[in-house]
């Protein structure tokens, strides 16, 4: 499959394009030439991605006469910390960069968030290009300009809004992604259907399983659709004062599960989001806001593609306590005047922001979910 398609994120002087297609790493030099202010970049990546994909990018940069150096960090969420941020910014400064030198983030959301934050702060702001290599990063984290690192008080607590100057989503890069990581990214694709596009959800019901199995044309179509949805929302609400909060569908529940499981391999971010969206839908049903049939339909789709449905059976079979989850939800960045913000749904494709869920109802719901998780067999639908 050749060729590529371009989307535009309309943000005035901070506008940029997202290019989605095949063989974009090899062609990156020519694409970057159009946006770089200097024919020089510092590429930031992780060891896994460097071994698999850095040579193709380097060949592309060489072909276009763009000078490059690479900083290679360890893979994993642990790299989004102060120590690696320090190592990265000192590494970039040691290379004698100028204000017009750009950074290039080649990797998943970890590399993208960390590099974006370094770009936001180095010399009071460098340009950077996102070249996402996970499905999660292609459909979500590389678009929208949220950059951050984690602190011991929580995830993504130190960061900045800093938009990239270009995003290149090379579908070929997904061929080397482990299935579990791919499914985690797929959860964010499902999110776009659930929050605002009923037809897209129906398309995923028809095509999701083949997409997960490896069909590149379907992957490309889903990445394009997801990026277009995110670009439109970000263009209308860059700073998440309103509509952009819908993109947090499933994230308040998911984040609480991630805090409990330690933000590591036990439960991937996308897996936590998948569970969180399922919980948000079932809570919406419980509150009488959403028809039970909608939640059942989503359960069937999760089952068909292999997304986790129950708290039982995840994270090596650990048990969750409702009050611990609620305590974490109460410390979420999205809490306003002490009230937990939840994204709920009236139906598939119709999500809304709610700060009105009574604490008792939320607790009753989570008690039943965590009690379920103690008695239901793993993987039960
Ligand atoms: N900024 C945002 O808007 C935003 C949105 C969603 C998530 N995030 C952040 O993104 C991070 C998660 O991103 P992620 O899921 O991409 O995780 P990740 O960056 O840790 O990548 C997952 C794993 O896949 C490996 N990998 C990457 N590309 C590969 C490829 N093509 N082939 C084989 N292996 C590959 C990585 O080395 C890593 O081990 C979290 O820190 C989350 O907070 C940010």
Image (cartoon, rainbow, N blue to C red):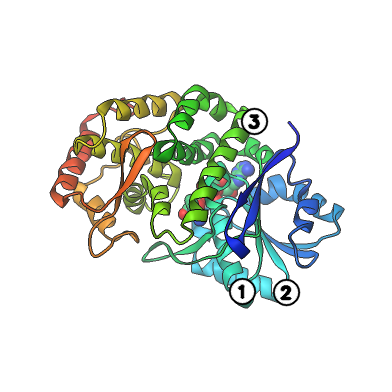
Is mark 3 in CB contact (under 8 Å) with mark 2?
no
User: Pointer 2: residues within 10 angstroms few (<14), some, or many (20+)?
Assistant: some
Q: Looking at the image, is mark 3 or mark 1 earlier in the sequence?
A: 1
Give x and y (percent) for residue 132: 62, 49
User: Label for residue 209?
Assistant: none
Quadrant assignment for the N terminus = top right
Determine which residue is flagged by label 2: 97
Secondary structure of the residue carrying tag 2 is: loop
First in sequence: mark 2 vs mark 1: 2
- In the image: residue 139, left or right of residue 29: left
In the shown orientation, is residue 70 left or right of residue 290? right
Q: Residue at x 34, y 33 (%)?
A: 309
Residue position marked by numbered label 3 in the rendering = 216
- Residue hosting label 1: 122
Choose top left, top right, bottom left or bottom right for residue 150.
bottom left
Q: Is any part of residue 80 visible from this angle?
A: no
- Local crowd size for mark 1, using a 10 Å CA cut-off: few (<14), some (14–19), many (≥20): some
Q: Position of residue 252 (x, y in %)?
A: 33, 51
What is the C-alpha distance between the residues marked 2 and 1? 10 Å
Q: CA distance from mark 3 to mark 2?
A: 38 Å
x, y percent for residue 318: 30, 42
Q: Secondary structure at mark 1?
A: helix
Is residue 286 something one can see in this rendering?
yes
Hey, which residue is sitting farthest left in the picture?
360
């Amino acid at each position: 499959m050749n060729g590529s398609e371009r989307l535009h994120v309309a943000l005035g002087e901070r506008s940029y394009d997202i290019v989605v297609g095949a063989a974009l790493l090899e062609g990156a030099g020519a694409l970057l030439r159009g946006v770089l202010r200097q024919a020089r970049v510092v590429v930031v990546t992780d060891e896994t991605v460097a071994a698999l994909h850095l040579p193709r990018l380097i060949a592309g940069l060489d072909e276009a006469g763009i000078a490059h150096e690479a900083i290679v960090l360890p893979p994993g969420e642990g790299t989004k910390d102060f120590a690696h941020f320090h190592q990265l910014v000192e590494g970039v400064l040691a290379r004698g960069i100028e204000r017009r030198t750009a950074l290039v983030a080649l990797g998943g959301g970890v590399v993208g968030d960390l590099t974006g934050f370094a770009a936001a702060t180095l010399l009071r702001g460098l340009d950077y290009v996102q070249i996402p290599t996970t499905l999660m990063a292609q459909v979500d984290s590389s678009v929208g300009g949220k950059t951050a690192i984690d602190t011991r008080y929580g995830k993504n607590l130190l960061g900045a809004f800093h938009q990239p100057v270009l995003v290149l989503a090379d579908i070929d890069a997904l061929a080397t992604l482990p299935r579990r990581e791919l499914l985690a990214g797929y959860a964010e694709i499902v999110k776009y259907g659930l929050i605002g596009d009923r037809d897209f959800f129906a398309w995923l019901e028809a095509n999701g399983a083949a997409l997960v199995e490896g069909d590149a044309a379907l992957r490309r179509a889903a990445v394009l659709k997801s990026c277009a949805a995110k670009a439109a929302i970000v263009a209308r609400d860059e700073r998440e004062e309103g509509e952009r909060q819908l993109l947090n569908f499933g994230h308040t529940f998911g984040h609480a599960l991630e805090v409990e499981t330690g933000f590591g391999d036990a439960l991937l971010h996308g897996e936590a989001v998948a569970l969180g969206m399922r919980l948000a839908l079932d809570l919406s049903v419980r509150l009488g806001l959403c028809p039970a049939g909608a939640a059942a339909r989503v359960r069937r789709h999760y089952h068909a593609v292999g997304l986790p449905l129950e708290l039982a059976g995840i994270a090596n079979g650990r048990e969750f306590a409702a009050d611990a989850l609620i305590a974490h939800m109460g410390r979420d960045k999205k809490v306003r005047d002490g009230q937990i913000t939840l994204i709920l749904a009236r139906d598939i494709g119709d999500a809304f922001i709610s700060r009105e869920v009574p604490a008792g109802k939320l607790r009753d719901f989570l008690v039943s979910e965590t009690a379920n998780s103690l008695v239901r067999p793993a993987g039960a639908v």
